[in-house]
Amino acid sequence: MKKTLSYGMVGGSLTAFIGGVHRVGVDFDGRAFLKAGCFSQNEAKNKECAEFYQVDDERTYKNFHEMAEKEGSREDGIDFVTITAPNDVHYEAAKAFLENGIHVLCEKPLCFEIGQAEELKKIAEEKNLLFCVNYSYSGNAMVKEARELITSGYIGDVINVNAEYLQEYLVDDIGAGDQVMVKLSSWRKDPAVAGISNCVGDIGTHIENTVSYMTGLKLKRVAAKLDYWGQPLDLNANILVEFENGAHGVFCSSQVCVGHMNGLVVRIFGTKGAIEWVQENPNILYVTLKGQPTQIYNRGMGYVTERTAEVSRIPSGHPEGLYVAFANIYRVWISSILKLKNGEELSGYDYDFPSIDDGIEGVKFIQACVKSSKNDAVWTEV
Amino acid sequence: MKKTLSYGMVGGSLTAFIGGVHRVGVDFDGRAFLKAGCFSQNEAKNKECAEFYQVDDERTYKNFHEMAEKEGSREDGIDFVTITAPNDVHYEAAKAFLENGIHVLCEKPLCFEIGQAEELKKIAEEKNLLFCVNYSYSGNAMVKEARELITSGYIGDVINVNAEYLQEYLVDDIGAGDQVMVKLSSWRKDPAVAGISNCVGDIGTHIENTVSYMTGLKLKRVAAKLDYWGQPLDLNANILVEFENGAHGVFCSSQVCVGHMNGLVVRIFGTKGAIEWVQENPNILYVTLKGQPTQIYNRGMGYVTERTAEVSRIPSGHPEGLYVAFANIYRVWISSILKLKNGEELSGYDYDFPSIDDGIEGVKFIQACVKSSKNDAVWTEV
Amino acid sequence: MKKTLSYGMVGGSLTAFIGGVHRVGVDFDGRAFLKAGCFSQNEAKNKECAEFYQVDDERTYKNFHEMAEKEGSREDGIDFVTITAPNDVHYEAAKAFLENGIHVLCEKPLCFEIGQAEELKKIAEEKNLLFCVNYSYSGNAMVKEARELITSGYIGDVINVNAEYLQEYLVDDIGAGDQVMVKLSSWRKDPAVAGISNCVGDIGTHIENTVSYMTGLKLKRVAAKLDYWGQPLDLNANILVEFENGAHGVFCSSQVCVGHMNGLVVRIFGTKGAIEWVQENPNILYVTLKGQPTQIYNRGMGYVTERTAEVSRIPSGHPEGLYVAFANIYRVWISSILKLKNGEELSGYDYDFPSIDDGIEGVKFIQACVKSSKNDAVWTEV
Amino acid sequence: MKKTLSYGMVGGSLTAFIGGVHRVGVDFDGRAFLKAGCFSQNEAKNKECAEFYQVDDERTYKNFHEMAEKEGSREDGIDFVTITAPNDVHYEAAKAFLENGIHVLCEKPLCFEIGQAEELKKIAEEKNLLFCVNYSYSGNAMVKEARELITSGYIGDVINVNAEYLQEYLVDDIGAGDQVMVKLSSWRKDPAVAGISNCVGDIGTHIENTVSYMTGLKLKRVAAKLDYWGQPLDLNANILVEFENGAHGVFCSSQVCVGHMNGLVVRIFGTKGAIEWVQENPNILYVTLKGQPTQIYNRGMGYVTERTAEVSRIPSGHPEGLYVAFANIYRVWISSILKLKNGEELSGYDYDFPSIDDGIEGVKFIQACVKSSKNDAVWTEV
């Protein structure tokens, strides 16, 4: 029986913040080992990263096409690949690995076109490969608690949603054109690399996914007003939303809101109760039943649902942070690949990682927001 | 020199919550005394209230028309009237007192039609009478601090606004028609008495006023989605807003958001900083400058602006609440009437009470929201 | 039947912060009217205050002895007196009014010597007069909620207490002798006027009273370390406490803790649950049952106890602050005097104001702390 | 040049919570690999853990004596050992590895007797070996920020300290003897295994260390009241403290405070400012300067000190939790051992891990508290 996996990375050189988070996330449970990579277009950086992680020279690749082919044909080839390169690489890289029989975990946003997204889905299905789009916040134990409570009817029917993701770090870009030292990586401002949206594409899509994960609801349409202030891509977005069940709400996504670091806050209101989650203090969930006091749920306590207890790693009051959210996604991801490799069937929580369908919803959401805003915030189907 | 005033009330019987707050608000500074009233249409209630407050029988009136005329012609007649009766009475009552030379402080919303509002303004101007529309939250010291900081440019140009007023107390009205015991006073559900909106008219208008007071900005247009769930008037509203300076934002107003009691929260984002005020803990203001830590301003400390220090009554850390907000409005209101009576000119902070122009803006806002929502949230000029 | 009272004040000139709070507190319910006073030793200030409040010249007194005698012998003499003069006046003034048959509400600390305190109690009892020592925080609705919950056994037996009252405003007095402009009124630093303690006497005593009121428990002994830093009276105190039921805890009282304005925080831990109250946000109570999520109780909601609902004045989410705490004490106080005057018996909540016994406990507590600290924090009986 | 290390573990089988945290902490930076272990006295558990982590059979040991000897004599022997076995093992195990030339990282409390602690220190010094006692909270970036600010004089001289570590999980042990299913591991209640204190030894010692780390101050004496409620070891402790610089304060340590999960809160008050850190939300630091608003420092922002920026791993607003605190200790620990192995000198932050001197202070603190409490809380030198 196969007990461990090997994996590779596209992107994620030593200086890339998110690459390191992925590697640590994998390492938490000690069931997968980094054996191949194409960490950077820059040869020196690529090599440096490979050496640091003791990846063999012959498995350190200059481009992902070569990597996908060679790893796909090795007997000891990687079982899955993590793609953390800039957005414009996602589609082609994912496709290459899928075609070579390798499971794919890809950063969000999945790709630029819905047709591409659906093509990836089709290949994965045909080849019986798993595909994860890394909406990492869904890995938090208390996001899962929210999902368990809401989808089991604990707060009744969802009637209103108020969610936001606010950051301040691009405020100097307002009206600055290219004249100031801005904090945004240059690739993020280039539509050819980043895609059609910056703010909605980078963080607004997390709002959409987290709400969808928590509630099980799909968006029907959006009325979005994006602010550009002279930049090629959006820095701020205020969005009216309508869900398939008729509920309304707002999503606010911004990189120019001073005082907010990484402020993803989701509030779901139902006919019987409400739930609030604040990403910056993620081990807490605010749960209120109609007419009752708000309750502060703590991860790790006896009253949380079975699922939350199961994914929780350390006792209540010991903060689990971003790395653990990644680790939780990887735990399911790796365990499910192992099951497949060992001929087991997947079911239930084996699929509790953000799927390619989530990725497709994300692409649709970004496109609808940009289109709506171009039409002065007219309602636009997602 | 006149040192004290006498005043009367229309509405505000002993069982009416807000009438009592007005009386206490007036009493804080001991400069005006209740001498006349038409407290209720119900004769027993009217009399009971008059007796409790030792208002003379002959100055306890059955209707406001009689009251306005008689008080207007007495030598010792009331100097101002406070109108706290249901919304449909505001216009006619205000008009009657103005026409009899009596200053008017009226609860919000001012009236139902913009034409009525402008008529009241015209009469007040012609007769050199003051008119206050009681947007009470503007009486809070830290709301004034926000106004001082923002209008002096402390946070730069306003670029985004996120404000909400959430309550839970009508959640049982969803889909209930008249079948459940609901907590809303019956008059508030009757469009003939309450006007064209419940949720936006009762609390949404406070968002509009508080933001306008803090920033000095006027709304240009709104795209509003109101939810009715089978009720004659709205229970929930999600509103995209655009200000005259081009800034966007959202206003969320709801009486069905479980977990929220009286949650007016205003966040103003500028190019240099941001300010947040939370009504339920009103002695605090969160002030952040770009790239700096958020600062928790406390009313009563040495670092607040001169104006805030001036209106503050008790030391820092001793909570001033809703009654003090009312008292602060009445302090300016009474002092300014005294100045007029004593032949002094008014200037600057003598006008620091919510004016009839604020009331007119409120009426326009309510009408624009309802109209926008009827047209599926199309942008509508305010 | 007597429906209203008249009262007088000793101390409380226009510039004295706490005098104004008393007057407003009385006015909230419109059942007592200021008719006499000896507001200041300073003749001009005394007169100015009397004029402002329209107190007759003949009832504006130069000293409290004259006031007590004359008011005691007038047919329309005051029913009660509020004593807010500096601490050294309390005993003599209270005695004078009691001896002239006038009910007494006195600021804390009651007096300097336990013998004096007991003498006052004896006179009050003999003359069937009510005596209130103004521990104002007990007037807060959510402090009463805590009391109702704890004394009814909701959190089980009290096993540990952690309470503090922290302020920052005297931090510049550390090591400064009289060399800096300090913020403490000069009388507060003079042991002859303030008594043997500043920090414990002014604010530490509120900790003792609030804990005692919430729990019904009496202190048995204290081990206190007071810090003086060269000042004649204490600025800081850390106190181990032991209650009569054997529970331990700490009381921390300080006027040199930067970042704290008026930070009275009381946490009571029991075998089944715990309760926390934070004075600066007084409409909230944190209630936790063993193994359950912490619940955020809001004043004004349906789930609070009957008593709390009864004393609550405005809906949930509308902040009641310091003035309301005073008003709540005066409401019971005035209502109970009216009952006595009308020949009714008092019972139950008619006594729900801080009594002379509370005042006596306060004096004992202050003395025990100072004595313990002089003996290097040895346990000292209260 | 040596670039990576190998290490071993004593204790830390798969079911032991803290063992897993250590392994993940080491893995964060990929510079040390688990190569040997004596994970459990239970042979099956020992083997299971070794297999899971792919530790060779020949390096999976039945007892730590054998492990220390064999690893000490192998050419590829482990460079350091992590000791996470129950408290009674610490001294002997640490001694064995030191004597065999292996660097030691040991869980707190270091050992039972001060003599033992000093012996370990002597051996380590003689053999030029590093010794870390795992006070893990010192690994948090914002604890380091507090240290940087305080030791550089930012808040002036420390004048008062208020710190607590509150948990609820043993509340059912009160008065229960052995009659209830308690949550405390049985070894923790056995003085022979746990040492002379449970609550002070397990968590109180973290208060002492965190305060000492942040301030650089040493305790002079304590007056402690421990509560046992019929248990062999303490469940609750209220402690007056005096520091060498004359400052006073309180430390409150409890495992019976309902509503608190893992509530380490440290507040340091100085003549110029104050700092507060709350372990359950560790990425935040509250910093207040005298007369100024409290500032909410966020890890990862540009205004933090150079040291904090250096140890920070992910951007502001992305929560770093307990695992990162461990990882930060291991990063310095591993890097310093590598420096030594490569013949480099250590200096400055190379020593920024909790040392054996910290461990010795901890043992002294525990002993002083227990002794003081036995003498009814008399002041006892640390």
Image (spheres, coloured by chain):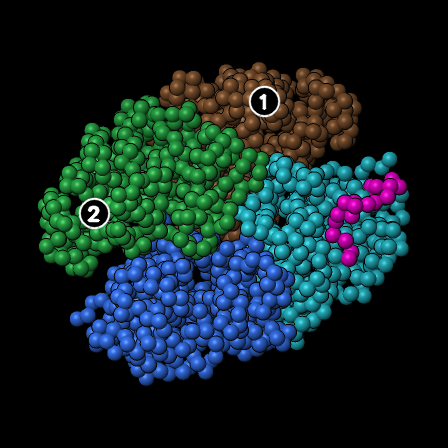
Chain colours: A blue, B cyan, C brown, D green
The image shows residue A344 at horizontal and vertical percentages of 22, 75
Residue D103 seen in the figure: yes
Query: What kind of residue is marked 2?
Result: Asp
Report helix, strand or loop for mark 1.
helix
Q: Quadrant of residue A338?
A: bottom left
Q: Quadrant of residue B198?
A: bottom right
In the image, taking residue C28 as reference, residue B4 lies left or right, namely right
Residue C133 seen in the figure: no
Residue B347 in the magenta stretch? The answer is: yes
Judge whether C152 appears above or below A377 on screen: above
Marks 1 and 2, Cα distance to the nearest angstrom? 64 Å
Residue at 77% across, 24% down: C47
Residue D103 in the magenta stretch? The answer is: no
In the image, taking residue C235 as reference, residue C106 lies left or right, namely right
In the image, taking residue B13 as reference, residue A209 lies left or right, namely left
Packing grade of label 1 (10 A; few <14, some 14-19, many >=20) is some
The image shows residue B281 at horizontal and vertical percentages of 57, 47
Judge whether B362 appears above or below A348 on screen: above
- The residue under label 1 is C188
Query: What kind of residue is marked 1?
Result: Arg
Residue at 55% across, 24% down: C173
Question: Which residues lie in the magenta part?
Answer: B337-357
Q: In this orientation, which residue lies closer to the viewer: C377 or B304? A: B304
The chain letter for the residue carrying disc 1 is C
Residue at 31% across, 40% down: D346
Q: In this orientation, which residue lies closer to the viewer: A58 or C176? A: A58
Report helix, strand or loop for mark 2.
loop
- The residue under label 2 is D79
